[in-house]
């Protein structure tokens, strides 16, 4: 565990890029081999729109990264935060830290975006995708990327998470999101087994069903425990899913890039 901590403490940007691109490539190929939905759609055009939003997410995180690093450094140097107040070996800090970062930086952020109207208007772009696949993972409006970054930074400081743990969490988060959005069909026994601990495609895809109460369920990113604990866990036959969000089911709302960028700023009726 010490060697893993040392690696992620100084992980090169090229390696983080490789994790992002490698994950997308792997799940993109698996979608061709074992797809859940086989209906035809303009896959490359769809990917182009989502990759644009992936790039804006990368840019936002790159520009603001110094805040995350400084926040982590301050918390550790000041011995501030839950992980600093409780003495534990590195492996235990990794487990506790990953679980709590997933709770505060992902589950809570996601839950809040569905509850606060202003935040929902930015998060809505993620839900307008009517052909959910691995490229949907980072389909976030730049404004939402800032919101998510703020939640993550606050979580890092409250927990006193060292920077190696932050980068480990972010790397796992990227791959997990690509995995649980992927249009792949896993054997039922495998998905059910993985779901006892991790968020799986069958679990997360329910969140992308176009109507309530399913849209307001299964908020987790890496671990499934938080949805089970807080009563937001829902099950649905994935083959009955219809992706999207009921207020924006028209073609321009999920195929037009400029339309999606402007949705959060439209005057509400």
Image (cartoon, rainbow, N blue to C red):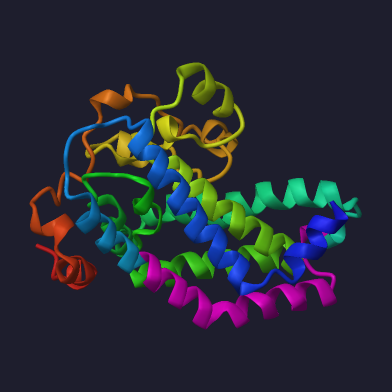
Q: Position of residue 5 (x, y in %)?
A: 80, 60
Q: Nearer the viewer, residue 216 or 257?
A: 257
Residue 183 seen anywhere in this rendered image of the structure: no
Q: Is residue 62 above or below residue 208?
A: below
Classify residue 80 as left or right of residue 102.
right
Classify residue 8 as left or right of residue 149.
right
Residue appearing at x 77%, y 63% in the figure = 7
Q: Residue furthest top?
A: 189
Task: Please check the rendered image and state whether residue 245 is part of the magenta-colored stretch, yes or no.
Answer: no
Classify residue 115 as left or right of residue 211.
right
Q: Is residue 130 above or below residue 171?
A: above
Task: Please check the rendered image and state whether residue 59 is part of the magenta-colored stretch, yes or no.
Answer: yes
Residue appearing at x 38%, y 46% in the figure = 28
What residue range appears in magenta?
54-83
Residue 124 seen anywhere in this rendered image of the structure: yes
Q: Position of residue 70 (x, y in %)?
A: 69, 80
Residue appearing at x 50%, y 25% in the figure = 191
Q: Position of residue 143 (x, y in %)?
A: 36, 72
Q: Position of residue 134 (x, y in %)?
A: 38, 47
Q: Quadrant of residue 141?
A: bottom left
Give the position of the C terminus as an image quadrant.
bottom left
Residue appearing at x 50%, y 82% in the figure = 63
Q: Is residue 146 above or below residue 66?
A: above
Q: How many marks?
A: 0
Q: Quadrant of residue 79?
A: bottom right
**Which secondary structure type mostly characterizes the magenta part of the structure?**
helix
Q: Nearer the viewer, residue 140 or 75?
A: 140
Q: Nearer the viewer, residue 150 or 18?
A: 18
């Amino acid at each position: 565990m010490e060697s893993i901590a040392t690696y992620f403490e100084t992980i090169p940007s090229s390696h983080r890029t490789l994790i992002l691109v490698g994950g997308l490539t792997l799940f993109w190929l698996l979608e061709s081999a074992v797809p859940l939905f086989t209906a035809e759609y303009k896959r490359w055009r769809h990917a182009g729109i989502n990759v644009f939003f992936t790039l804006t997410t990368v840019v936002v995180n790159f520009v603001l990264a110094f805040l995350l690093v400084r926040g982590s450094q301050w918390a550790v140097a000041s011995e501030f935060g839950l992980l600093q107040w409780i003495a534990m070996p590195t492996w235990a800090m990794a487990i506790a830290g990953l679980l709590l970062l997933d709770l505060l930086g992902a589950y809570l952020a996601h839950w809040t975006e569905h509850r606060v109207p202003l935040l929902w208007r930015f998060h809505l772009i993620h839900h307008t995708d009517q052909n959910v696949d691995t490229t949907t993972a980072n389909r976030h409006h730049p404004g939402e990327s800032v919101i998510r970054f703020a939640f993550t930074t606050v979580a890092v400081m409250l927990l006193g998470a060292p920077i190696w743990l932050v980068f480990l969490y972010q790397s796992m988060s990227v791959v997990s999101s690509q995995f649980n959005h992927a249009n792949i069909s896993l054997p039922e026994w495998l998905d059910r087994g993985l779901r006892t601990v991790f968020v799986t495609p069958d679990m997360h895809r329910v969140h992308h069903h176009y109507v309530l109460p399913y849209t307001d369920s299964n908020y987790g990113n890496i671990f499934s425990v938080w949805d089970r604990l807080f009563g937001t866990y829902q099950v649905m036959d994935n083959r009955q899913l219809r992706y999207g969000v009921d207020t924006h089911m028209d073609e321009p709302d999920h195929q037009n890039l400029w339309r999606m960028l402007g949705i959060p700023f439209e005057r509400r009726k």
